[in-house]
Amino acid sequence: MTVKTLLKKLNLSQEDFSDVKNAIQSAEKNTSGEIQVAVTAESASYSFWELLFANVMASIITAAFIPLANDFKAFYTKLNWQSCPDWILPVFFLCLYFIFVIFFFYVSNIPFFDRIIIPAFAKKLAVTQRAMRFFAENGVYETKEHSGILIFVSYLEKQVRIIADKGISAKISDDLWNLIADELAENFHNKKYTEALVNAVSKCGELLAENFPAQKDNPNELSDSLIILEDSEWL
């Protein structure tokens, strides 16, 4: 799934981006913690699983055509008024196989089928790794008090991760973040995309304010914008 497709599905306007940004800024006024929000179309390209599915399906269907080999030879003879050469059948089945591979690879790239084809463990691992990679690359772990938190949504896999830096983990149980993540995922399922993100930010902000209240010197260390990850960020 491309970023363009993602934005179309989420139907996010500039006002929606502003709402999320305002929610982050409002939450961070009461805490020394930092909140980062990122959404990606998918956490990996999954080409291995899509190609595997395409090849398996192509093999099964091509094999199902083998009993019809004599019928094909008879049709060739009738059409060309000559016997079917020995090389025709192998070429025919090879072409048939590649046609089915192309067809099923295309089908496997449709998000609905992609979710079915890709094993659950592969999706879970990919989302976790992508979230951790962004957490590291975008400097969420580098805040002064190690009080950065990442709200990460992967649309294709329909999964959410909330990753807290070590300073937060020492004070706040992961179970609380998981409750917020579950609610965020449910709201995304109900297509309340902006509301889901704003609500998650607000609840994260409340937890951070209780444990990391705002200090006199309270610099803004991370971007407050909603970040949409590009396709090039695939693993």
Image: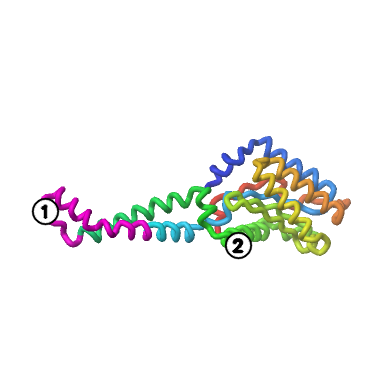
Viewer-closest of 226 and 102: 102
Residue furthest to the right in view is 216
Q: CA distance from mark 1 to mark 2?
A: 57 Å
Residue 12: give x, y in percent of width and height.
Answer: 63, 38
Residue 85: give x, y in percent of width and height.
Answer: 16, 59
Question: Is label 2 in a helix, a strand or a loop?
Answer: helix
Which amino acid is tagged 1? Gln
Q: Is residue 33 magenta?
A: no
Magenta-colored span? 59-87
Q: Earlier in the sequence, mark 1 or mark 2?
A: 1
Q: Quadrant of residue 5?
A: top right
Q: Kindly identify the residue that appears in the image at 29 percent across and 59 percent down.
A: 66
Residue furthest to the left in view is 81
Q: Are marks 1 and 2 in contact (CB under 8 Å)?
A: no
Q: Residues within 10 Å of mark 2 (few under 14, many from 20)?
A: few
Which amino acid is tagged 2? Leu
Residue 56: give x, y in percent of width and height.
Answer: 41, 60
Q: Kindly identify the residue that appears in the image at 77 percent across and 64 percent down.
A: 166
Q: Residues within 10 Å of mark 1 (few under 14, many from 20)?
A: few
Residue 168: give x, y in percent of width and height.
Answer: 79, 60
Q: Which residue is mark 1?
A: 82
Nearest to viewer (mark 1 / mark 2): 1
Q: Quadrant of residue 19?
A: top right
Question: Is label 1 in a helix, a strand or a loop?
Answer: loop
Q: Is residue 75 magenta?
A: yes
Apparent side of residue 86 relative to residue 127 in the rendered image (left or right): left
Q: Main secondary structure of the magenta part?
A: helix
Q: Which residue is mark 2?
A: 125
Colouring: rainbow
